[in-house]
Image (cartoon, rainbow, N blue to C red):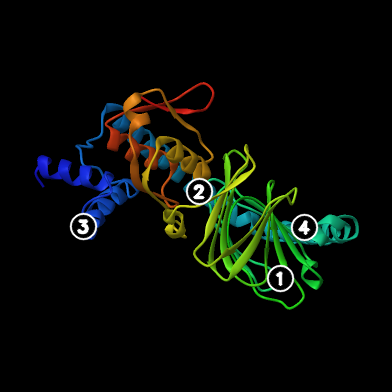
Amino acid sequence: MKFSVYKKLLKKYHAGEGSDAERQLVEIWYDSFERGETVFDARPNIEEKQRVRERLRTHMRVSSSLSVSAKRSKRLIPWLKGAAAVILLVCGISWLMHSYVRDKLNVSDQQTAHFFTGPGEQKRVALPDGSTVILRANSRLEMKRDANKKQRLVQLSGEAFFDVKSLAGSPFFVETDELLVQVLGTSFHVKAYTYRPTTQVFVYTGRIQVNDIAKTQTWLLRKGEGFDYDQINKRFKKQSAGFANSWDDSALDLKQVTFSELALSFRDIYNLSLTTTDSTVLNRHYTLKLKYQRSASETLKIICHMLNKQYRKEANGYLNIF
């Protein structure tokens, strides 16, 4: 592809324009980043060649020592079998004792189920009541194990998609730092990271009731409706239509977002902070997919390629684009 055509295609993609075929072409090219493919010449330099030689020498030394020790090991096999049996017996007794003590003393583990995800991780959780939760990266969910006997209460810090099973006389509650969401049987999305200035709720099926913690404001949301809750001003605001299509198990689909929103979304997935003082970077709007299967460095390379910029890690741990 000629460079001029390639440049126009990227420009249309990042402006949110272009046909589906053109968008797919750019996505395929971006996916080549995570497969280790490169557009440029990648011949090994002198240092890389030296590292390869060292690995080969190490491999030869290890192989040689293994061949010498193989003869000795035959005489040790009967003794090793006996030792292994003793070790397995000791480990088995230790595990049984640990389980007994845990069941007797750790009452909180019996009462509450804890679910966590780390950077770049997603987890599908099947709750005891038959409901399903998809927990996104850097999130925490807690639920009382026996909560479905009366009312079901989960506490969320982070982001999750809920598909709640309807149980007569047993309402389902989701509690965040700022909101309390009540449902009877529906599917909805909650984004409640503590560092974000807003908590977001969107309903896909059914309906839910949303209260602030002080219960001074109450909203009833139906299918296709969502609200942002401003944690500073303590106010609800109706969401734009774009948030409705933002849920995807494999990626965050960003369309014409500001750098501020890009940086927040990057932190949502990787728990890393992006920053810049470059006016070009700050004033631009971004259209791209942040894929969970990509590493933070791969995603950052794509962002910098879009901008024709570089990045460095600062002393405070921030990733600065310049």
Q: Nearer the viewer, residue 291 or 295?
A: 291
- As helix, strand or loop, the secondary structure at mark 3 comes to loop
Residue tagged by mark 4? Answer: 91
Three-letter amino acid code at the position of disc 1: Pro
Residue tagged by mark 3? Answer: 19
Q: Is residue 150 above or below residue 160?
A: below
Residue tagged by mark 1? Answer: 128
Q: Position of residue 56 (x, y in %)?
A: 36, 39
* Sequence-first disc among 4 and 1: 4
* Sequence-first disc among 2 and 3: 3
Mark 3 surroundings within 10 Å by alpha-carbon count, few (fewer than 14), some (14 through 19), many (20 or more): few
Quadrant housing residue 107: bottom right
Residue tagged by mark 2? Answer: 120
Q: Nearer the viewer, mark 4 or mark 1?
A: 1
Q: Nearer the viewer, mark 3 or mark 4?
A: 3
- As helix, strand or loop, the secondary structure at mark 2 comes to loop
- As helix, strand or loop, the secondary structure at mark 4 comes to helix
* Sequence-first disc among 3 and 4: 3
Quadrant housing residue 92: bottom right
The answer to whether the residue labelled 4 contacts the one labelled 2, judged by CB atoms less than 8 Å apart, is: no
Q: Position of residue 95 (x, y in %)?
A: 79, 59
For residue 61, say whether it is visible: no
